[in-house]
Amino acid sequence: MTIPGTQPHLRSLMLYSHTDVVPTFKDQWKYDPYSAHKDENGDIYARGAQDMKCVGSQYIEALRRHFNRGKKQWLRTIHIVWGPGKISKALKPRSYYCIQTSDLTSDYGIDQWKYDPYSAHKDENGDIYARGAQDMKCVGSQYIEALRRHFSRGKKQWLRTIHIVWGPDEELGGVDGGEKFCKTDEFHRLNIGFVLDEGLARVKITCCGSPGHGLKFIENTAVEKLQHVMNEALAFRERQRQILLADESLTLGDVTSLNLTIIEGGVQINVLPEKYTAYFDIRVPPTVDFDELESTIAKWCREAGDDVSYEFIQKNTNKNITPTTADDPWWNAFEKSLRDLNCQFTKEIFSGATDSRFLRSLGYRSIGFSPMINTPSLLHDHNEYLNENVYLEGVRIYETLIENLANVLE
């Protein structure tokens, strides 16, 4: 979805979000995670309410409000892009790009939800429960609503072109969506200057050993080797956790997080398998030496014994960081927008891996931002929700961001 700027030759603005979401344990939800239930407080429960259906819809609503006020165009072209699954300093200004992903994580543990995670149930507080309510259906819809509000006020165009983009598979790593898209001719023709969105290593370790009958004390078993790797990995995890706890100024983005997420192996209960496989999700900040981390993983495998190997399913070693200093015009426009709205904020490195990492690796500026004020982070968790008033306030914030970012002079 593209809104041409008054000077479309300038680098454009891209609003990105993803359309996929993570799975749910429906039995752990207060309401159906796919019902978008709104309770009496205005909280909307839904998978994607926070990650990130809210953002994509907020883009649209922010633009709609501009349009309703008569604003139809900005200096730069705006592109709204939806990713199917979790997506510089040139002399002439680039475009502005807002990203949202369209995928969700899969439907696991639905019985853990308070409401059906696909019902978008809104309770009496206005909280909307749904998978994607926070991650990140909220963002994509906020883009749209922010633009709608601009349009309703008569604003139809800005200095820079705006692109709104939805990614299809960000929750799966974005390798078939955002990563491939940003390498295409179609993407480069968007003429991107700045991206608005929300270090990743995924490691598979395979331990092979002697198979045998379950009644014997078999030597050199795969599970013993796996146990060594697990002990080393979890000890590393605990050291990083203690670093974080010991310094209040640190955030998750300042340390390396590691979690064992999958273990595969076994044939039947009385047979020792010849192989176990473990999968680790590791989030690596750009301040960490990736080669040193890989050497540590290799050391775990060597010490575990023979026939223990590792491979990276995903490996992102890019250290490009978007400038957030006073001399950067894009950051100035972003910061001014929030300060004008009296929004208190702090800058930090987001520990999650979004499609923006593919763009930063190519030298594009990209900021991750989801306006979920005073809301507990429930990304990928049970009972993900977003309050309707918080959501609508996010739309108002996007209205201001779009107005200022789409008119950046550089």
Image: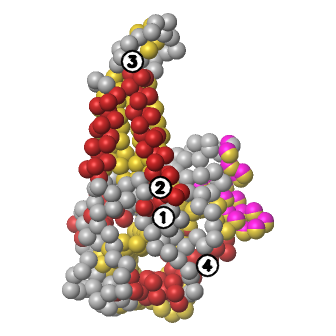
Q: Which residue is mark 4?
A: 393
Q: What distance separates the C-alpha of mark 4 from that of mark 2?
A: 35 Å
Q: Is residue 298 above or below residue 190?
A: above
Q: Indicate the secondary structure of the residue bearing disc 3.
A: loop
Residue located at (36% from left, 82% from top)? 325
Is residue 119 highlighted in magenta? yes
Alpha carbon separation for disc pair 3 and 4: 57 Å
Of label 3 and label 2, which has the lower sequence position? 3
- The mark found on residue 250 in the picture is 1
Question: Residue 187: x, y in percent?
Answer: 28, 68
The x and y percentages for residue 8 are 29, 86
Does residue 63 show up? no
Magenta-tinted stretch: 111-132
Mark 4: give few (<14), some (14-19) or many (20+) Cα within 10 Å. some
Q: Quadrant of residue 302?
A: top left
Q: Residue at x 22, y 66 (%)?
A: 185
Q: How many marks?
A: 4
Q: Earlier in the sequence, mark 2 or mark 1?
A: 2
Where does residue 271 sit, x and y in percent of width and height? 46, 12
For marks 3 and 2, give the CA distance: 34 Å
**Which residue occupies the foreground of this view, 94 or 269?**
269
Residue picked out by circle 2: 243
**What residue type is disc 3 on?**
Thr
Going from N to C along the chain, the mark reached first, 4 or 2, is: 2
The residue that label 3 is drawn on is: 221
**Which sits in the foreground, 320 or 162?**
320
Q: Of the residues under marks 3 and 4, which one precedes in the sequence?
A: 3
Mark 1 crowd level (few <14, some 14–19, many ≥20, 10 Å Cα): few
